[in-house]
Image: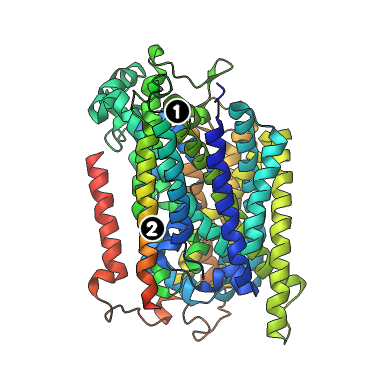
Amino acid sequence: MEVQLHLIDYIIMVIYFVFVLGIGWFLRKYMKDAKQFLEAGRSLPAWVTGLAFISTNLGALEVMGMTGSGAKYGMLTTHFYWIGAIPAMVFLAIFMMRFYYGSKARSVPEFLKLRFDEKTRALNAILFAVMTIMASGISMYALALLMEKVLGWNFNVSLWLSAAIVLAYTYLGGLSSAIYNEVLQFFIILIGLLPIVILALMEVGGWSGLKEGLAPIATQKGFAPDTLTTTWKYTSDANANPMGVKWYGIFAGLGFVLSFGYWCTNFLIVQRAMAAESTIAARKTPLIGAIPKMFIPFLIIVPGIIALVLINNPGSGFSIMENGKPNYDLTIIMLLKHYLPAGVLGVGITALLASFMSGMAGNVSAFNTVWTYDIYQSYIRPSTNDAAGDARHYLRVGRLATIFGVLVSIAAAYLAGLFGNIMDFLQTIFSMINAPLFAVIFLGMFWKRSTANGAFAGLLGGFLVALTHHGLTAPAGATTLVKGGWLSLIHTYPVEMAQNFWTAIYACSASTLLTVSISLVTRRTKTDEELKGLVYSLTPKISEKNIPWLKRTNTLALLVLIIFVILSILFW
Amino acid sequence: MLDIKIPIGLMFFVFGVILTIYGFISRNDAEMYQKSFSHNVNLWMGGLMLVFGAVMLLLVKRRKPKT
């Protein structure tokens, strides 16, 4: 399964690295204080933050995983990009972004501090910092392993080298450098993967040929012939589709709880919008990101679905078998190998490396901000009277945090290699902070009666409920306790995804219930005046009347929703 | 600050030049392009990148007189 690279492929890769580092080098002279370094000076245009917004989510594990899911579940995978992203992104843009941006909070934990209190911030900041670094380490491990397996590169060399490049450009240019590179990476991912989509569609005879090719495969699995090329059609019964979930599970679990938890409250994502130059640019950020987001499935999921046809056709010479078992994570790289001659192959491999770097740089740049502002400045060394001195001091701390973050990621990567199961388990656990966090922030923004103690209880309680649910349930066929059921097994889900959906649904509901009930019996600690700009009913309505209607946020949001509806109907 | 269109435009322009030349040189290598059903993908993608890079760079130039 090894992929042979030629000199030309390496030349392309090296040129890419030169540009990536060059951007960091060029931006270094602008990094005069912590605000520049950690918040990009809040000066970037909406199209830049918008592309970075989705690019940071387009990490290597995402690309590999989604192509693999395409090969496993077919078009149903697009739910992650349509219902599982677009409504949340529009909601973030229209209703939530003005509070994040307008509050002058520099991070999501800091927003919690402004809206609620210190302990709520501390809980979220610490969980977020640990989760971010761990996610970064796990993805580094996965990438280095893949490079070793497929390209024959030395594991340690690819791990340290890729980490060193990410460190170099984020250390030099901070968040601006991370965001600029994410935009560059977005385009290289787009152009690098484009030829495999075109060639793969040619091979199977276009969309209609693909449908024909998939029909026998679906029937063989016991589904209707068009199950793998439709999205909602076979979701009225969990057993009628390969994902094993019903429409309301997709709707509530993925479309509401998981996606709102991820897109609306994950600082990694929200930070991109916070770096925008104005409130309107910040509000447009998720919407500008949403447009390419809706079309990314054609770039990474459709090739995966085509791979499924190739896998089932022995004559195609395409295989993702590893030690006698299919390894779906190999799908994308095997497609690159299958279709691309030297030259464009280099661009394709560079695209994979780029996706890895954008994911990692995103983690590192979110980590150093939360560490510097929410942990260091809050508990270790608070600001002094010397504002200019502080700005320089926190810049230094931010830079050190960047080095520290990368080093801990590397350590996490080795731990993932040694104790893979434990790391997976920890990552599952920490991913449980998002759903309750959304409930708490949502109530905080739209219900002025919600109190600090209510929020803290909601955050912690929701997390514990998620943990308990995970401990009591497991996906069918789970062989390790990492997948769940480590307390005692009271329910088995058909697939892991269904378990994830329901974990999030329970966590979000519990968090909402707790926050509301505790808020009703506790006293508010912030006055209406203090909550101005943080709570909907206490903030003057936003007006874009003075902007031509074509340029208004609502117009863009409407456009996004129209495309979303059209795509959903086309691929119903 | 740096206009991001400059590095994007430059990088894709350079990629475009390299791939177009490479595609041109290897145009008779039938075995190499067997994978892509005899389509010279290097030439096509190289051309696309040249155009994309050039458009990005042109967008930068147009902005300049304003400032």
Circle 2 sits in a helix, a strand or a loop, which is it?
Answer: helix
Report in which chain the residue with disc 2 lies: B
Residue A386 rendering spot, x and y as whole percentages: 72, 86
Q: Against A280, is A87 above or below? A: above
**Vertical position of residue B53 compared to residue A302: above or below:** below
Residue located beneath label 1 in the image: A341
Q: Where on the picture, by quarter, is residue A89?
A: bottom left
- Res. A310 visible in picture: yes
Q: Amino acid at mark 1?
A: Pro
Classify residue A368 by image quadrant. Answer: bottom right
Residue displayed at 26% across by 45% down? A567
Residue A500 marker:
none
**Residue at mark 2:** B56
Seen at 67% across and 54% down, the residue is A167
Give the left or right position of residue A348, taking residue A423 as reference.
Answer: left
Disc 2 residue type (three-letter): Met
Task: Give how far across and how far down residue A48 sits, in percent.
Answer: 44, 62
Determine whether the residue tagged by mark 1 lies in a helix, strand or loop: loop
Protein chain holding label 1: A
State whether residue A196 appears in this view: no
- Quarter of the image containing the C terminus of chain A? top left
Q: Residue at x 52, y 41 (%)?
A: A12
- Relative depth, front residue between A470 and A162: A162
Crowding at dot 2, Cα within 10 Å, few <14 / some 14-19 / many 20+, comes out as: many
Q: Position of residue A562 (x, y in %)?
A: 24, 55
Q: Nearer the viewer, residue A455 or A545?
A: A545
Q: Nearer the viewer, residue A139 or B7?
A: B7
- Image coordinates for residue A219, horizontal then vertical, percent: 31, 18
